[in-house]
Amino acid sequence: MNRHLLYAALDAAERGWAVLPLRPGDKRPALHGEDVCPGIGDCAGGHRKWEERATIDPDRIRRAWGDLPFNVGIATGPSGLVVVDLDMPKRKSTTDTPNGVTTFTALCERAGHAVPTTRTVRTASGGVHLYFTAPSGVRLGNTAGRLGKRIDTRAWGGYVVAPGSLTPTGAYAVVNDMPPAPLPEWLSARLAGRQASRALMAAPSAVRASRYAAAGLNAETASVRQAPEGERNATLLRAARALGRFIAWGDLPREQVEEALQWAGEQAGLSPRSCEATIRSGLNWSIARNGQGRAA
């Protein structure tokens, strides 16, 4: 198995895509966190996170995958990629719940465009990853559900599990091995437009977010990112409950809080679906209790 995964990592690197080791049979990075950083090797000059340590160096890859069957992650930002993740409904969902592919197809139809043909990978759960080359002149980040239900995107600050990787639910496998197509302009415009509007909302002078609310958002997302293992989900829930009052009071838009907490939770090592459920629960709880407005 080691050799198979080593080849998967080397194949990605040969395409110019920076890779990082993921835990065997898992989707989480196998690299140490800042709280336990030894301050040596790659981190001798200060802790380096997984995105900074992702590499295309074949010698480093051979050393990293030499002994353990690490799964393979592709750091999308450094690799110049934007990956559209089309997910499947949870097993307990009703049979008529649309999957990400169906939602994305409908999105393309409404926009008047055909579904793009590009490099395609089937995920372990039966979902789909669509690989695109990132547009020049704009630094896109991750999104969670912004284009539609069960549609996420991974760019700077994100990674995807590479084909060849194995999890208890199955393997990641290439469906279409063509080179990634450029990200369609209409999709790029939607993603870049979302980011621009969020940046305005978070600015100190923004009408919809007070300085106090913006500071609270920054503080809570930082606490989630830095939460130690075993406390991450509880920290995320507390952060969602703390920030829900700003939504109820009209200081922050819900979509901005959801996306900021989603990014922070995934950076901490939580799964996207776990983050979504925890954030929704915490925000709903807080909004229901703060819906009457702030005290004078």
Image (cartoon, rainbow, N blue to C red):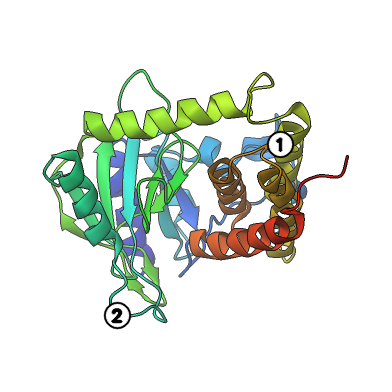
Residue 217, given in percent of the width and then of the height, sits at 70, 39
- Residue 238 is situated, as x and y percent measured from the top left of the image, at 75, 58
For the point 72% across and 48% down, which residue is it?
A: 243
- Above or below, 218 against 168 in this view is above
Mark sitting on residue 95: 2
Q: Nearer the viewer, residue 236 or 176?
A: 236
Callout 1 secondary element: helix
Q: Which mark is residue 104?
A: none
Seen from the viewer's position, the closer of residues 173 and 87 is 87
Q: Nearer the viewer, residue 42 or 281?
A: 281
Residue 150, percent from left and from top: 37, 59
Q: Is residue 99 left or right of residue 57?
A: left
Q: Residue at x 28, y 35 (%)?
A: 187
Question: Looking at the picture, how far across and down is residue 62, in whole percent?
Answer: 41, 50
Q: On residue 218, which mark appears?
A: 1
Q: Is residue 274 left or right of residue 165?
A: right
The crowding category of the residue bearing disc 2, from other C-alpha atoms within 10 Å (few below 14, some 14 to 19, many at least 20), is few
Which of pointers 1 and 2 lies earlier in the amino acid sequence?
A: 2
